[in-house]
């Protein structure tokens, strides 16, 4: 699995801890102030399940409970794309976007920040 970002993101790599902070709405901007735009796959996606287990060490269900609590504070969960191709297109075109795709995808036009097991 590859963690990808829009070409204008001002970093070339990311730690698992930073990635978790982004997807848990604890880190809201890249260095320099560009807003972070995290993007998930749909909840039933095996890719999202794997991402959740590797990055958060939690299941998508546990994360859904987390976001249900945060909604009461006015925070919205990451946007969702329904395929690797949709994810690549979104991340490529939205400044500050970060997402993930299965390894082996053509990643033209995006930065690869991390390879996850």
Image: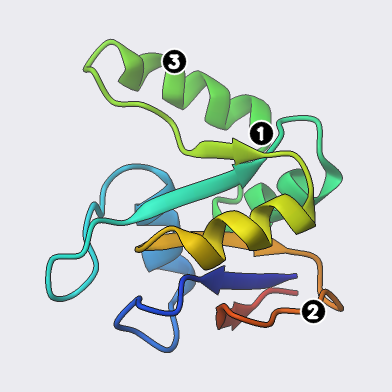
Q: Secondary structure at mark 3?
A: helix
Q: Residue at x 44, y 76 (%)?
A: 15
Q: CA distance from mark 1 to mark 3?
A: 12 Å
Note whether 68 is above or below 27 in the view shown: above
Q: Residue 105, image x and y in percent?
A: 82, 74
What residue is shown with label 1?
A: 60
The mark closer to the camera, 2 or 1, is 2
Query: Image point 59% across, 80% down: which residue?
Result: 109
Q: Which residue is mark 3?
A: 68
Contact, mark 2 vs mark 1 (Cβ under 8 Å): no
- Residue at mark 2: 106
Between the residue at mark 3 and the residue at mark 2, the CA separation in whole angstroms equals 34 Å
Q: Indicate how the structure is coloured in the image.
A: rainbow
Label 2: how many residues lie within 10 Å, few (<14), some (14-19) or many (20+)? few
Disc 1 to disc 3: CB gap under 8 Å: no
**Residue 55, horizontal then vertical, whole percent:** 57, 58
Q: Quadrant of residue 58?
A: top right
Tag 2, which secondary structure?
Answer: loop
User: Which label's residue is closer to the chain start, 2 or 1?
Assistant: 1
Left or right of residue 36: residue 44: right
10 Å crowding of disc 1: few (<14), some (14-19), many (20+): some
Residue at the outermost bottom position: 12
Q: At x 13% / y 66%, what residue is drawn?
A: 33
Q: Which residue is painted at 57% across and 71% down in the image?
A: 4
Q: Which of marks 3 and 1 precedes in the sequence?
A: 1
Residue furthest out toward the top: 72
Q: Position of residue 86 (x, y in %)?
A: 71, 51
- Residue 66 located left or right of residue 102: left
Front in this rendered view, residue 8 or 100? 8
Task: Give the CA distance from mark 2 to mark 1.
Answer: 26 Å
Q: Residues within 10 Å of mark 3 (few under 14, many from 20)?
A: some
């Amino acid at each position: 699995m590859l963690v990808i970002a829009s070409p204008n993101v001002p970093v070339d790599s990311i730690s698992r801890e930073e990635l978790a902070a982004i997807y848990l709405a604890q880190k809201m901007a890249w260095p320099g102030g560009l807003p972070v735009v995290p993007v998930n796959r749909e909840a039933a996606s095996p890719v999202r399940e794997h991402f959740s287990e590797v990055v958060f060490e939690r299941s998508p269900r546990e994360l859904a409970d987390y976001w249900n609590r945060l909604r009461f504070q006015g925070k919205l969960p990451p946007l969702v794309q329904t395929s690797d191709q949709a994810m690549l297109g979104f991340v490529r075109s939205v400044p500050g976007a970060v997402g993930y795709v299965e390894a082996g995808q053509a990643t033209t036009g995006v930065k690869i920040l991390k390879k996850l097991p």
